[in-house]
Amino acid sequence: NAGVTQTPKFRVLKTGQSMTLLCAQDMNHEYMYWYRQDPGMGLRLIHYSVGEGTTAKGEVPDGYNVSRLKKQNFLLGLESAAPSQTSVYFCASSYSIREKNEQFFGPGTRLTVL
Amino acid sequence: EDQVTQSPEALRLQEGESSSLNCSYTVSGLRGLFWYRQDPGKGPEFLFTLYSAGEEKEKERLKATLTKKESFLHITAPKPEDSATYLCAVLSSEGAGSYQLTFGKGTKLSVIP
């Protein structure tokens, strides 16, 4: 089992460019999450999904969109990148939220917006 | 607003010198407290889940405990490979199927040979 994988590992964008980050999990988890991690800020939830075809906003959703067309995949999109979106992005998944709710994280994507 | 505070921010220990990391929280409706380990350049790795006050979990040199206001991660006779940032996260719910997971900022542990 690969667990949670993320593509790409690194990316540099210019302000205004768009990109999509891909997250895949092979654990048959219902819940998937996108976080960003910034120095001194801790992990902050961007968007999450409670199942295929569903998405919901987290703590810092502005400037991002997500889609969950397949249960195993969760995509994070930046339509018009800004320097404030320079960060490390982590995807996570969990079986449930009530029980077996520990989250398993991917290796991260380091994004720099110039 | 839910709050999770970890202390200290950084901790340097000599190999074999036992110590504890603290995670204090202010949430309504605790549904679980999680400990993660994060190595530089990697994603957080799940360690423990604690659900109720008095609960304890152990894994090798690590032992996590939970009270009504805080959790401790005890590290016994640490080794250099225990060096990492340790994250605490609290899952809370105010009912009606609404859950929130709040992460602390972490404690960076360095174990010196």
Image: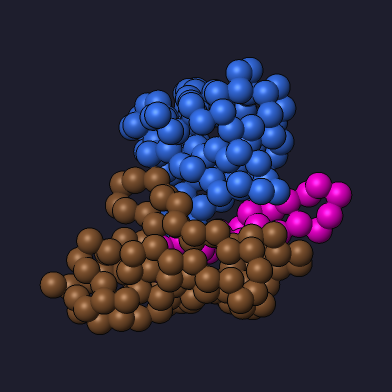
Task: Give the color of chain A as drawn.
Answer: blue
Give whichever of B79, A39 is nearer the camera.
Answer: B79
- Which residue is situated farthest in the right direction here? B96
Q: Quadrant of the N terminus of chain B?
A: bottom right
Residue range (magenta): B86-108
Q: Residue at x 69, y 34 (%)?
A: A50
Residue B103 on the magenta span? yes
Q: Quadrant of residue B78?
A: bottom left
Q: Is residue B13 above or below residue B85?
A: below
Residue A86 drawn at (x, y percent): 43, 41
Q: Residue at x 38, y 39 (%)?
A: A107
Q: Is residue B98 above or below residue B6?
A: above
Residue A113 drawn at (x, y percent): 41, 35
Q: Is residue A1 visible?
A: yes
Residue B35 on the magenta span? no
Q: Is residue B96 above or below residue A75?
A: below
Q: Is residue A64 visible?
A: no
Residue A10 drawn at (x, y percent): 33, 32
Q: Quadrant of residue A75?
A: top right
Q: Residue at x 31, y 46 (%)?
A: B41
Task: Give the color of chain B as drawn.
Answer: brown
Give whichever of B6, A83 is nearer the camera.
Answer: B6
Q: How is the protein colored in the picture?
A: by chain
The secondary structure that most of the magenta stretch takes on is strand
Q: Is residue A22 left or right of residue B15?
A: right
